[in-house]
Amino acid sequence: MTAYQSGISSLAVSFPKTIRTNDYWQQKYPELIPQPRSRRVKRPIQKNSLSNDLDIWSQAVAPYLSDPFRGNVERRVVDDGESALMLEYTSAKAVLDAINLAPTQIDLIIVSSLFSERLGTGDAVALADQLGLNVPAWNLDSTCSGALIALQNACALIQTGEYTKVLVVASHLGSNAVEPSDTLAWSMGDGAGAFVVEPLKSGQGLLGSKVVNTASTCGAYVHELVIDQAGNPRYFTRTGENMSMLAATAVDFVRDCCRAAIKSAGVTLEQIDYFAFNTPTPWYSQVCVQALGISSERVINLYPHYANIGPVYPIANLYHAALDGRIRENDLVLIYSNGAGATAAAMVVRWGDVALGPAPALPLQVISEQEKVSDILQTKNDSHVVSHVNSDIQISKEKVLAAQPKQKKALIEAYLLQLLRHLLQHPELRLETEQSLRYLVDSLVALEIKRRLEVDLGIQVPMLKLFQNDCIEKLVDFIVEQFMVMSLTAPFQLSLDRNNGDRNDDFQELIL
């Protein structure tokens, strides 16, 4: 257990004035909105032991497949007169005012900006200049975990005696990184948050932490440098080929980090009073609750308010939990974040007497029901959304391999059409193989299709195949081609299995 004796003494958040609801896309991009689907019959939900970590993710996703907006409700977005630096400055001033600190009392600034307009150099020095400070100002990047990594570093630096008061600021301009005509924009929000780290009372502050890299999720998102219509360089983000690893690794990361942080802090899971998980998706809190086996009553879920606000989430979660009285002085709080292609981090803190900045504007359409996190998930038998396709089609990798070429295509075509109806929750939906996938498939449905093809047929399908303007028939042809390759290599592999015995292991090592 590391005795940091330092932690958060004040918190503030800052959000853009514009609250964008789903009405924006319904009015401007109606073609993106799936047609209303038949209501599925709710089945009894029972508590069960899920044998596969990926099942936890899939079961948490299931309730959102029937929602055209996939659980997205509101997001705050900057207008032409706002910027990341403006939001950072507002939150920095608010957090200093909350604790009655003059800017000159700060001796270090750490800034974590994700998708800021300032490419390459970051916002730290510009923020220090706006605050009128001549102190060290560092940029720290760890995608969605930036704020937590900054907290750990600030506490460690204060422990050395080199610094006494550290200002940490995080921002996220998700709307700046996507086109509004992309369904990924539904989940992207903007905002900033700040906190001051300094020595606290004995026993308060950061008690333990665990940080790991998330290299397995590299490539989940692709960031491309483009020139926008105004002639300014911007990063544009889209889903990448490795997106499925976000689901495959989510449970392991939250379990490993949280358990290790709790052990490092010298406490138990049962002693934690409150949990603050970052929520890059509407169902992420549910995944964390199920992975750790904790009560949802001790978990905050702000996703309906803000959508994905990246590194700002730890700050916003703590701010709102403290503002609502869910966190009180001397409570044990576990904070967790997962940054794709960067780090996953969990930290246990004993809450101090934390000052709070002004409250942000209330949401427009969010209702309390949307903020609730369930303690239980559907069982495999009850969930007909994420299980194997419920139909008369009995398909397997072996059956397709054994079929004649024309039969292969017919089998895969029937399977894929039924899978699409199943995931779109519209059993009677009329689908033709000439239809484009563009307006049928968003990132969530694409992820489920990719996963089902891997589980049911052992086929790896690039994400781009599910997002391009290609029609369903082209996807069928691609899958058929993969099976043709399998058919050609299967006899050779079978010969190796039968005749070479131990040599097969050597062959596998060569091709892997």
Image (cartoon, grey):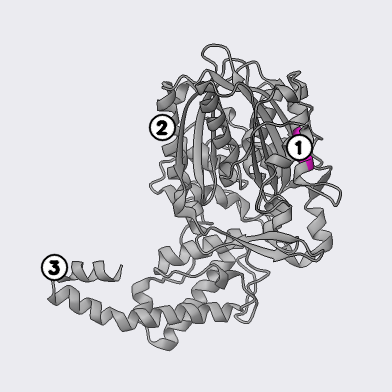
Q: Within the image, what quadrant is residue 31 found in?
A: bottom right
Q: Closer to the N terminus: mark 2 or mark 1?
A: 1
Helix, strand or loop at label 1? It is helix
Q: Main secondary structure of the magenta part?
A: helix
Dot 3: within a 10 Å radius of its alpha carbon, few (fewer than 14), some, or many (20 or more) residues?
Answer: few
Q: Residue furthest right?
A: 81
Badge 1 is on which residue?
A: 129
Whether pointer 3 and pointer 2 mark residues with C-beta atoms closer than 8 Å, the reply is no
Residue situated in front as seen by the camera: 477 or 406: 477
**Magenta span contains residue 57:** no
**Quadrant location, the C terminus:** bottom left
Cα–Cα gap, marks 1 and 3: 67 Å
Q: Residue furthest top?
A: 202
Inspect the image, locate mark 1, and give the three-letter code of the amino acid beneath it: Asp
Which label number is shown at residue 502? 3
Residue at 68% of width from left, 25% of height from top? Answer: 106
Inspect the image, locate mark 2, and give the three-letter code of the amino acid beneath it: Ala
Front position among marks 2 and 1: 1
Q: Closer to the N terminus: mark 3 or mark 2?
A: 2
**Magenta span contains residue 87:** yes
Which label number is shown at residue 260? 2
* Res 390 visible: no
- Residue 448 lies, in percent from the top left, at 53, 60
Dot 1: within a 10 Å radius of its alpha carbon, few (fewer than 14), some, or many (20 or more) residues?
Answer: few
Cα–Cα gap, marks 3 and 2: 40 Å
**Stretch of the chain drawn in magenta:** 86-91
Cα–Cα gap, marks 2 and 1: 39 Å
Residue situated in front as seen by the camera: 372 or 206: 206
Q: Is residue 10 left or right of residue 57?
A: right
